[in-house]
Image (spheres, rainbow, N blue to C red):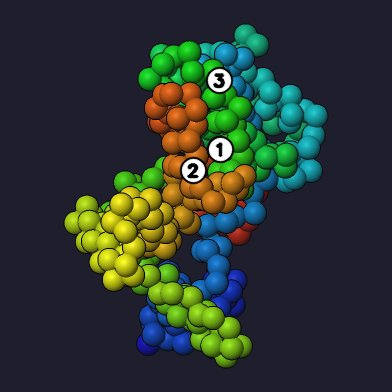
Amino acid sequence: MAEISAQLVKQLREMTDAGMMDCKKALVETDGDINQAVEYLREKGLSKAAKKADRVASEGVISLKVAPDFTQAVMLEINSETDFVAKNDGFKELVEKTSSLVQDKKISTTQSLYESHIDGVGYEEYLKTQIAKIGENIVVRRIASITAGANGIVNGYVHSNGRVGVLIAITCDEAKNALACAEFVRSICMHAAAMKPQVLDFKAFDSAFIQKEKTALIAELQKENEELKRLGKPQKTIPKYVSRVELTEAILKEQENIFKEELKKQGKPEAIWDKIIPGQMERFIADNTLIDQRLTLLGQFFVMDDKKTIAQVLEQKSKELKDNIRIVDYIRFELGEGIEKKVEDFAQEVAAQMQ
């Protein structure tokens, strides 16, 4: 059996917010494997936080440029070692010039950027010169570039602190309606910046992922219910399903028939069933798609109208314009996300990338 050190327990606690003894038990059960221990705690409903190991304390900025006619947009993550340098005028100028270069030359990868030219020199040489002036390592970590289709537009939003950015592209059946949606699309970008959807919709999930998340979600709800019961408060319903991935046409039809039987028993006239059942089905779907509401853009309830999901807001806008508006691209950057902390601090990470 692996030795469970106090440092390892502390690390797991920082990653999950679970209790110290729960962390120690999880590490014992998983023979000291910290990743398995995180999953163990999630399955037991004891992990209150996302994997904090993925949230490196990086610095820098998310930069966004959208064309005036909303036909094209780019977003970059440019990392620095410290927040102090991220606020430096020299760094800000570098970000502006790099973003303009990426947009003007329609650059879509960091490799293409480093092979391009700016101010009469290769970009890589330019960047090294700026690093020497600024006194800190700087890395253009990633680039997103979207060009709208013939009947679409693209818009974006960067949070005021420069740490979160979103790009969304839509398409319409009628080209004339696309431009009228520019501000609407920006409002959805603002929602995504705040609510952190990981993917566009449930189609990005496979059944194995859903089963894993379902186990963790049910354990979490059961744990919450223990506390609610202790406090004498109403307990939360444990859902049978958690995503539209699970809600097949057969299941939805079966539920619709259940509602019809209930209305029949209540003596409700059949003539009004069509006015009652759609609302019941909406509620049923909302109650059984909790994972979608947490992780998908279309499944989340809109922050500006929390009675409608983003999908329903799109449907409403489509009816207003007598069109069919669809989101065709969704990209969200958060500063430093997904960087594995293989070194002691982010400064060393950046330095390693510059080697």
Q: Earlier in the sequence, mark 2 or mark 3?
A: 3
Q: Classify residue 184 as left or right of residue 259.
A: right
What amino acid is labelled 2 in the image?
A: Ile
Kindly identify the residue that appears in the image at 57 percent across and 13 percent down.
69
User: How many angstroms separate mark 2 from mark 3 (CA)?
Assistant: 18 Å
The reply to whether callout 2 and callout 1 are in contact (CB within 8 Å) is yes
x and y percentages locating residue 258 in the rendered image: 26, 65
Quarter of the image holding residue 162? top right
Residue 310 tag number: 2
According to the image, label 1 marks what residue?
188
Judging by the rendered image, the residue that carries numbered circle 3 is 180
Q: Does dot 3 land on a helix, a strand or a loop?
A: helix
Image position, residue 180 (x, y; %): 55, 20
Front position in the image: 125 or 306: 306
Q: The disc labelled 1 sits on which kind of residue? A: Ile
Amino acid type of the residue tagged 3 in the rendering: Ala
Q: Residues within 10 Å of mark 2 (few under 14, many from 20)?
A: many
Would residue 209 be seen by someone viewing this image from the given angle? no
